[in-house]
Amino acid sequence: MEVDMKSMVVADENNKQQERAPGEESDGSPKKRKLGGIKTMPFILANEVCDRFAASGFHANMITYLTQVLNLPLVQASNTLSNFAGTASFTPLLGALLADAVAGRYWTIVLGSIFYELGLISIVLSAVLPSLRPPPCPTQVNCQEANTTQLWVFYISLLLTSLGSGGIRPCVVTFAADQFDMSKSKVTSRGWNFFNWYYFSMGMATLTAITVVVYIQDNVGWGWGLGIPAMAMAISVVAFVIGSRLYVKLKPGGSPLTRLAQVIVAAVKKRNMPVPEDPGLLYQNKELDAVISVHGRLLHSEQFKCLDKAATVTEEEARNSGPPNLWRLVTVHRVEELKCIVRMLPIWAAGILLVTCSSHLGSFTIIQARSMDRHLSRSFQIPPASLSIFANLTMLSGLVLYERVFVPFIRRFTGNPVGITCLQRMGIGFTINILGGIVASFVEIKRKKVAAAYHLLDDPKAIIPISVFWLVPQYVIHGIAEVFMSVGHLEFLYDQSPESMRSTAAALYWVAISGGNYLGTLLVTLVHNNTGKERNWLPNRNLNRGRLERYYWLVSGIQVINLVYYLVCARLYTYKPVEESICKEDEEAEPAKDEVPAKNMANGANGNAGEMELSADAERA
């Protein structure tokens, strides 16, 4: 797809960029087909929905597969899943760099989907072939664990799905957002939040997986239970490719890491040069930055002024009429790209400890649920892994209520068209999540109290006469927290990142999850190894004799410290200033090369992104 690098013009209200239709002559006589917009969503979201369905159906009950099919000890199984989740959340950084630098988002998604499908097929084979799993052990006592070969087949399957996730996760949400005009003026006038509805679609896919797929895994078999997600992923690849002619496909702008390195190197080389007091004297080049600033250039900010040295023009460079050496002189836009990343990192880092504290809760809660009364009727029991349905239902209904009730109500007090800022939304999510850990600790105390009353503490396979629905409140609380934290975090990273690095910024969301999972593994291992053998907090086989509630208290305390850190970072954060270029809907003529529209400053504290805009209407936002 062609991008007009001279005019730097954003498309019409549907952000429909144009490209030549098949068979179009070079004179452009046939009418150009408009791309992007809402018509692309069925194809793009079909890929992400099927991916999420496959991933949720695979992961939701995997702790059961590892402990009851591969016969791994609880702590080893939980750490295996956390390490895998960490790897699957780190590879998006590699996929994002590939997308932003070389391949573009479309081809990165296609390649990632193929790898993911290969991984799912491998996992299905490991579940179906008897030689790839140990003998059954219904008593869960003195079980033969999976041998090295069987584990390696399973690990290779996980690695393939991790590589696939690396191509899909950072690119689908940004590729979908590319189909719309995501400037502040358009977002506030649209009346709906793209990220809310994106997350809603993902929640519906997860909800379907943890009800239908988990039930099949527990009651029909692991072959079908893992085969259905594999088939769903295959359908997603086909759907995504079918819609390829409708998509806006922005060209990759070159390696973002190289541009960031050039700023640092240039600033170091000119470390002894004074920075001019007038920012207008710093180096700017619209043509050089055109491909990485299609929707508007970043404007100079006062923070991290030492980096401005990279854009300071020497007398020799001023006399040079040729292209600059980017390892000695870079534009203001490129300097501000680095400043954006540096400003975002402290906020981003707060999400790591949140994931650390939550990474193992799902595994432990499923083991708790398996020991409780799960009957909905005499003949039907709810699968333990399906309890997360309550978190998903809460999240789905919460997103609708957030959009239709919370935002209209709160904007009366804030004056913000989107209700509250991304940072405020994340802070609320951090706070609510702490309550979930505290509630979980009291539920565990209640569960063990009932087990002691019926003399069941020494029987790990016993069903304790306490309803599994005691676990529901903590799921509901975590679902509410996700409405605020997860969506707000993703929106913040997309909105505040440079436009040429949005895949990389979306990957940071998953890298935070990766780091959190690895730290979670370290935390669980330290707790398991340092809390004794008699009353270990996290025992391998009999959770009834453990002290899981103390682990919940520990992670809740860590989250309180993390919340204080986040509030300090959010208070000091400065929103990025950006110049947005706009054009009339039917404007055909290209603006003059030296034409510079007037600028207006939008209020960064109250706006969705706190951006500088060229639209006069943005002043009222």
Image (spheres, rainbow, N blue to C red):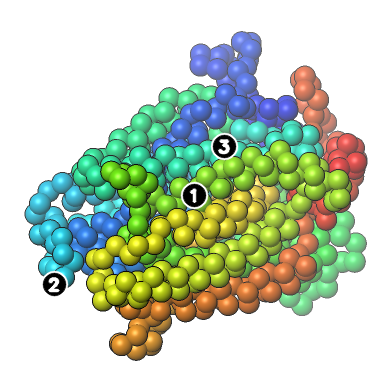
Give whichever of 452, 407 is nearer the camera: 452
What amino acid type should be assigned to the residue bearing mark 2? Asn
Label 3 Cα crowd, 10 Å radius (few <14 / some 14-19 / many 20+): many
Assign a secondary structure to mark 3.
helix
Q: Position of residue 97 (x, y in %)?
A: 50, 53
On the image, numbered disc 3 is attached to which residue?
176
- In the drawing, does residue 8 fall left or right of residue 162? right
Label count reads 3
Packing grade of label 1 (10 A; few <14, some 14-19, many >=20) is many
Q: Nearer the viewer, residue 605 or 113?
A: 605
Residue picked out by circle 2: 142
Q: Secondary structure at mark 1?
A: helix
Image disc number at residue 116: none
Which of the two discs, 3 and 1, sits closer to the camera? 1
Q: Is there any visible trace of residue 226 in the rendered image?
A: no
Measured in 3D between alpha carbons, the distance from the residue under mark 1 to the one under mark 2, in whole angstroms, is: 35 Å
* Mark 3 vs mark 1, CA separation in Å: 28 Å
Whole-percent x and y of residue 292? 65, 46
Element type at mark 2: loop
- Who comes first in sequence, dot 3 or dot 1? 3
Q: Are marks 1 and 2 in contact (CB under 8 Å)?
A: no
Residue depicted at x 16% and y 70%: 141
